[in-house]
Amino acid sequence: MIIFYQVFAILMMAFLTVAIITVITTKPISIIFTIPFWPIAVFMFRLGKKAASLEEWLIISENEIVLRKKNFSYLKEWKIPIEGLKGVNLQTVGFWTSIKNMSYYVRRRQGEYENMLYPTIEYKEKGSHKVTFFENATDAEMKWITDALQKLIPQPAS
């Protein structure tokens, strides 16, 4: 599905380029009508490229969980101490968080409009934090990873 968005964006840009060249040679003022389509094509191309190049690592050691997200433009890393874990579960995320992920568009095309859940790690380190990860995984993979990580949460001593 990610490839579809990239191919569509490239074809859209090619069409717009040909349209602009044609318009410039006949009626230059008509170029104004193509302007709204350029940002859409660029947005779809960047989103597809970001999703296609995204790599995620989840490294679990005795003391901490390290989550790394890397794509063509950035590397982001979270170090989460095991004793600071508050919870690992599937949660709905905010609009701006979900719209940045390609899986949001794929799942909407599949008819899921509400209650799109993503794996989320909640932890305490100088305040309370949440990290969403594995957004492009299937529902079964998301459930499996949250169940596996929930076993790492320290239980209070009785």
Image (tube, helix red, strand yellow):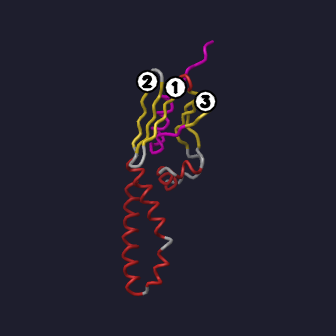
Residue stretch in magenta: 131-158
| Marked residue nearer the N-terminal end (3 or 1) | 1
Q: Is residue 154 left or right of residue 22?
A: right
Q: Residue at x 56, y 27 (%)?
A: 85
Q: CA distance from mark 1 to mark 2?
A: 10 Å
Q: Nearer the viewer, mark 3 or mark 1?
A: 3
Q: Residue at x 43, y 37 (%)?
A: 68
Q: Quadrant of residue 42?
A: bottom left
Asked if disc 3 and disc 1 are in contact, CB closer than 8 Å, the reply is no
Q: Which residue is mark 2?
A: 61
Crowding around mark 1 (Cα neighbors within 10 Å: few <14, some 14 to 19, many 20+) is some
Q: CA distance from mark 3 to mark 1?
A: 12 Å
- In the structure shown, which secondary structural element does the residue marked by tag 2 occupy? loop
Instruction: Find residue 153 and report its horizontal and vertical position in percent.
Output: 54, 24
Q: Quadrant of residue 12?
A: bottom left
Q: Which residue is mark 1?
A: 81
Q: Amino acid at mark 3?
A: Lys
Q: Amino acid at mark 2?
A: Ser
Q: Which residue is mark 3?
A: 126
Instruction: Find residue 124 and report its horizontal and vertical position in percent.
Output: 59, 29
